[in-house]
Image (cartoon, helix red, strand yellow):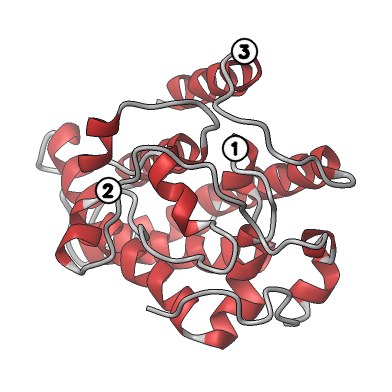
Amino acid sequence: MKIIFFSLLFIMLISEILFKRREYPIKNNWILRSVGFTTIQFLIVILFHNSLDRFLEKNRLYNLDSYPEFISTSIAFLVMTFVSYWQHRLKHKIPFLWRYLHQIHHSPERLEVLTSFYRNPLEIIINMVIMSSVLLLGVGANVEVATNVVLLLGLADMFYHWNVKTPYWIGFIIQRPESHGIHHLYKVHSYNFGDIVIWDMLFGTFKNLKTFNGKCGFGENREEHILAMMMGKDMSEGRYKKM
């Protein structure tokens, strides 16, 4: 699964160069910032996989080990996408969570694969604690199944930030880049919170755009104020819809 993940990551990065859907503005030090955040995220995920996940696996009250790996992975993935939907939605609804955790991810004016990893390290740590707790203690998954789910969620995240054109019908199964565009749209930053669209459909936040040519981010080079955002200053100045 890990080989598949990194192979697809490489293919997606190359395809954005060869078949990019649209041009986005390039801000100061974008490559340095995005690669830096990507590296930090991978290091945090590896750390949690080798420490917290192993610890929690030994302290499960029950487990899914008797099920085939495909079945247990499917169950764990569905549960985790539900939790992630509400976790994500709360980060938009509660100003404190928006300012201190999530706004960094929404600040760039570019929507591409690297944007999926462009996150506050504190948000990543909290995400991993919640994810590990839900998957291993709540669902009873083992480390291998939990790893499968993390990689599947990572692939989904990369897919709907991918700067290539995708078929409209896919948007009724999983988020696609054109649909996720409204989630990053300037002065909107809402709708389409889920990795799979069933949760957005059920809870009234689903929008499947045929195309997206809007402006992303906060504008006015606000994305460059990383330290200010990490300290809780709302660089979006409330320019997002709370749902």
Q: Please give left or right for residue 205 compared with residue 6 in the image.
A: left
Task: State the SS at label 2.
Answer: loop
**Residue 90 seen:** yes
Q: Which image quadrant for residue 119?
A: bottom right
Amino acid type for the residue under numbered disc 3 = Leu
Answer with mark 2 or mark 3, whichever residue precedes in sequence: 3
Answer with mark 1 or mark 2, whichever residue precedes in sequence: 1
- For label 3, the residue is 18
Residue at figure coordinates x 66%, y 44% from the top left: 110
Total residue callouts: 3
Residue at figure coordinates x 54%, y 74% from the top left: 240
Residue 156, given in percent of the width and then of the height, sits at: 39, 39
Separation of residues labelled 3 and 1 (CA atoms): 13 Å
Amino acid type for the residue under numbered disc 1 = Glu
Q: Which disc is residue 112 wearing?
A: 1
Is there CB contact under 8 Å for labels 1 and 2? no
Task: State the SS at label 3.
Answer: helix
- For label 2, the residue is 196
